[in-house]
Amino acid sequence: MSYIIEKLNDSISSVAYHTMDNMESVTVGVLVKTGSRYENDNKAGISHFLEHLVFRGTKDFTANQIVKSIEGVGGTINAFTSQEYTCYFIKIRKEFLDLAFKVLSNMVLYPILSLEDVNRERKIIIEEIKMYLDIPMRNIYDLLNSILWKNHSLGKLISGTIDSVNSISRDDIQHYKDISHTSSNLVVTACGAVSRS
């Protein structure tokens, strides 16, 4: 875990880990306090948008390298956004723990966020929104949340709306990343074949 802690100048809000001596693998994650409840209505979906974009490439890894570096050694990598946080995570054999943290820290701290990738990902997200609207079993939970949390930030759609996603610019995303993906806003987690050192 030393790589990501070093990159964040030892000022991480929290580090949580659990050692499981019988495990040969480890699951590591970075949780960022970003999600739909913290977004302005006109930029609804920006946390989810950013989650998509970090997989498009970073300072040290191309999009292809992000996936191949983890999946090429038998690991899995994924992310999700909720109302209150975004989670980036990797499950991998213990001997590749440093690699996992290097990839995660690059994704969280140094995504490229190119205009081309923003425009490409915008189309993908809009198609996702349309798809969810066509799946009653998925859409019902969004409708329930909007009723239960009427006029409250927890009732917002995590993905945003087509209008809000269309209104989000590359500069909006860069600014949002700069103010949200900071050391005081992160929790680093690890569980399995891991120790604090």
Image (cartoon, rainbow, N blue to C red):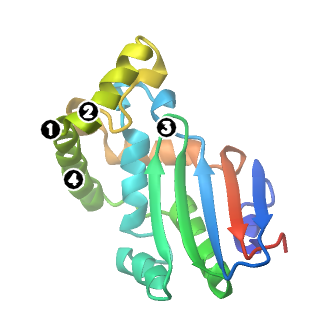
Residue under pointer 2: 139
- Marks 3 and 2 close (CB-CB < 8 Å): no
- Marks 3 and 4 close (CB-CB < 8 Å): no
Residue under the image location 26 percent in, 55 percent down = 121
Q: What distance separates the C-alpha of mark 4 from that of mark 2?
A: 18 Å
Q: What distance separates the C-alpha of mark 2 from that of mark 1?
A: 8 Å
Residue 80 visible in rendering: yes
- What amino acid is found at the position of numbered circle 1 in the picture? Asp
The earlier-in-sequence mark between 3 and 1 is 3
Above or below 23: residue 125? above
The earlier-in-sequence mark between 2 and 1 is 1
SS state under label 1: loop
Above or below 114: residue 49? above
Which numbered dot is residue 119?
none
- Viewer-side label of 3, 1: 1
Q: What distance separates the C-alpha of mark 3 from that of mark 4?
A: 19 Å
Residue under pointer 3: 35
The earlier-in-sequence mark between 3 and 4 is 3
Q: Position of residue 145 (x, y in %)?
A: 39, 23
Residue under pointer 4: 124
Q: Is residue 122 left or right of residue 103?
A: left
Residue under pointer 1: 134
- What amino acid is found at the position of numbered circle 4 in the picture? Ile
